[in-house]
Image: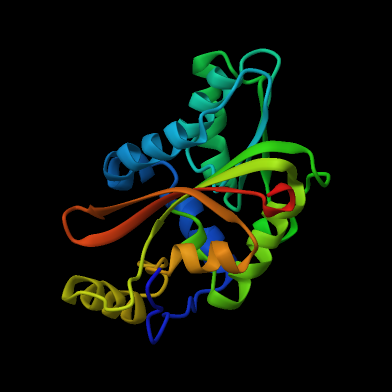
Amino acid sequence: MTGLPEHIEPVTRSVGQAQAFYDRLSRFYDLLSGASERRYVGIGLGMLAVRPGEHLLEIGSGTGHALVALARQAGPDGRVYGLDLSLGMGAVARARLLRAGLERSVSLVCGDALHLPICSAALDGMLMSFTLELFDTPDIPGVLAECRRVLRPAGRLAVVALSKPAHPSFSVAVYEWFHRRFPQLVDCRPIPVRHFLAQAGFIVLQAQQFRMLGLLPLEIALVANGENH
């Protein structure tokens, strides 16, 4: 990154409010947001390049689309975990895994990424899409520290997130206004993605930038656990 934005908007809704919101939204989430997000999640999955037999975690697994892809790529010798704060999202994901015949390949957990219920150095890879920007700024280093803890020394993490450049555009300013005005409805906001990843000790292997819906900057980054680099 060439510079940091002067200000990163805070996340003011509580964890309980977020949980209740996504519980209510879970049955309709794919209709409202799924189509616009799926292309970028697919790019993140491509960067992660899952190999058969790997152990993987998706943080913010939502309705389970990426879990299906991860489980198929990891194969019968692999293991996939999906973590989400919302029980409603987990129920939709479980139904999707059942339809795909993958319910035994994926373990779903309702929990918070600040306290991952996984042993240290247990995972080969992780995916976090449209999730890191949901955490308030002081919590992001803690989330990424947990990611590094559960990843093996050569482990890797793919992140898909709304990105805030050093000099934000008018469209970003408008989006942030809605975030301030309706913090429970527009609960995520753009963040300097690679800054937080580097600050946490990750090594950036690949990064691509896009404009979601032609307006909002979005970054997809593949990073490696810095312990072995």
The residue positioned farthest toward the front in the image shown: 229
Residue 51 vs 174, above or below: the answer is: above
Say whether residue 116 is visible: no
x and y percentages locating residue 142 in the rendered image: 68, 67
| Image point (56%, 36%), residue name | 91
Identified at 48% across, 54% down, the residue is 22
Give the side of residue 152 with respect to residue 37, left or right: right
Q: How many marks?
A: 0
Which x, y percent locates residue 49?
Answer: 51, 29
The quarter of the picture where residue 8 lies is bottom left
Displayed quadrant of residue 170 = bottom left
Q: Is residue 121 left or right of residue 10?
A: right
Give the residue displayed 67% in from the left and 41% down from the top: 155
| Camera-nearest residue between 225 and 191 | 225
Q: Observer-nearest residue: 202 or 24?
A: 202
- The quarter in which the N terminus is drawn is bottom left
Using the image, determine if residue 28 lies above or below residue 200: above
Residue 146 at what x, y percent from top left?
A: 72, 57
Q: Colour mode?
A: rainbow
In the rendered image, residue 228, in percent from the top left (x then y), is placed at 73, 47
Q: Residue at x 49, y 79 (%)?
A: 12
Residue 69 in sight from this viewpoint? yes
Q: Is residue 139 above or below residue 68?
A: below
| Drawn side of residue 217 relative to residue 214, left or right | right
